[in-house]
Image (cartoon, rainbow, N blue to C red):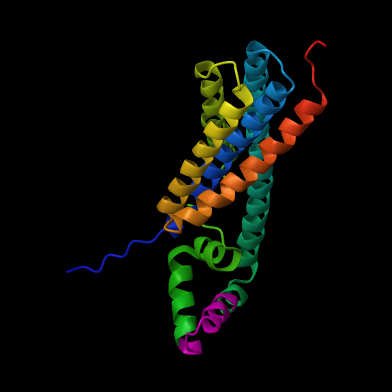
């Protein structure tokens, strides 16, 4: 029977991006609408503020991810170009460098040199990118993909407090949004922990605590700038 192992580390990249975007969407949008609602604004104004927060937040996430990942991609391309030039001008030194890496990982020098020779004969640049630079095809930076994924996950998260505004009664809107979104955050934290193979309770508690803190602070600001007519 083949030995099949199930690992969670291959999910960490997309899981981190999806959870981060959704958490940001819930916390920032819910905090915004709770702050506006605490200032005793009308439900319509609270909804408008929430929609504006969704659009602004999604664009901010997309822009930030695009700029960040584009910078990473530029650095990766520069490193690959430099490595390609070193392979062209001094392949023996690069081969020894690769062998030294394998020696550092526990291979005998002779075997390390044999492995380096065979791998470089198969794909010299790809091998050095992976072993020396830590760049793999799966992990290579993709700015457009990162921007779209971040904007989409933020939008999904931000839609939850907006749906609560539409369905909840106007009385006690700030409390309704707060409690509902804390429940959403707890579920999201537990789901992310389950997919990642870690403890559910700690993850749910962690994200719920920070969400409650954010909404509590914005609610305090809303009470301070009370806009209700005297």
Q: Nearer the viewer, residue 14 or 90?
A: 14
- How far across and down, in percent of the image, does residue 229 sit? 80, 10
User: Image point 43% across, 46% down: which residue?
Assistant: 191
- How far across and down, in percent of the image, does residue 172 sit? 61, 22
Tell me where residue 213 sits by quadrant.
top right
Q: Is residue 72 left or right of residue 191?
A: right
Majority SS type along the magenta span: helix
Q: Which of 217 and 61 is in front in this view?
A: 217
Instruction: Verify whether residue 98 appears in magenta.
Output: yes
In this view of the protein, can residue 70 be seen by the observer? no
Query: Image quadrant for the N terminus?
Result: bottom left
Instruction: Verify whether residue 108 appears in magenta.
Output: yes
Q: Seen from this angle, which residue lies furthest front?
A: 230
Query: Image quadrant for the C terminus?
Result: top right
User: Image point 63% across, 41% down: which residue?
Assistant: 212
User: Image point 31% across, 65% down: which residue?
Assistant: 5
Q: Nearer the viewer, residue 159 or 213?
A: 213
Tell me where residue 132 sits by quadrant.
bottom right
Task: Determine whether 131 is above or below 68 in the image.
Answer: below
Q: Nearer the viewer, residue 175 or 68?
A: 175
Q: What stretch is highlighted in magenta?
A: 97-110
User: Image point 71% across, 22% down: which residue?
Assistant: 36
């Amino acid at each position: 029977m083949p030995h099949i192992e199930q690992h969670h580390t291959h999910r960490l990249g997309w899981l981190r991006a999806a959870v981060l975007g959704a958490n940001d969407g819930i916390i920032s949008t819910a905090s915004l609408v709770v702050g506006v609602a605490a200032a005793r604004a009308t439900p319509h104004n609270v909804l408008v503020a929430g929609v504006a927060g969704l659009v602004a937040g999604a664009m901010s996430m997309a822009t930030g991810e695009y700029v960040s990942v584009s910078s990473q991609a530029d650095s990766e391309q520069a490193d690959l170009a430099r490595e390609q030039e070193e392979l062209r001008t001094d392949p023996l030194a690069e081969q020894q460098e690769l062998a030294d890496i394998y020696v550092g990982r526990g291979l005998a020098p002779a075997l390390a040199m044999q492995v380096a020779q065979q791998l470089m004969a198969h794909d010299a640049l790809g091998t050095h990118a992976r072993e020396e630079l830590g760049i793999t095809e799966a992990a290579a930076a993709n700015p457009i993909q990162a921007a779209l994924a971040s904007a989409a996950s933020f939008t999904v998260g931000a839609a939850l407090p907006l749906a609560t505004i539409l369905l909840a009664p106007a009385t006690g809107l700030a409390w309704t949004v707060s409690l509902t979104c804390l429940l959403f955050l707890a579920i999201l934290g537990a789901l992310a922990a389950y997919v990642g193979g870690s403890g559910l309770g700690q993850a749910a508690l962690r994200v719920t605590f920070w969400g409650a803190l954010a909404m509590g602070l914005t609610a305090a600001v809303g009470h301070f700038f009370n806009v209700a007519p005297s």
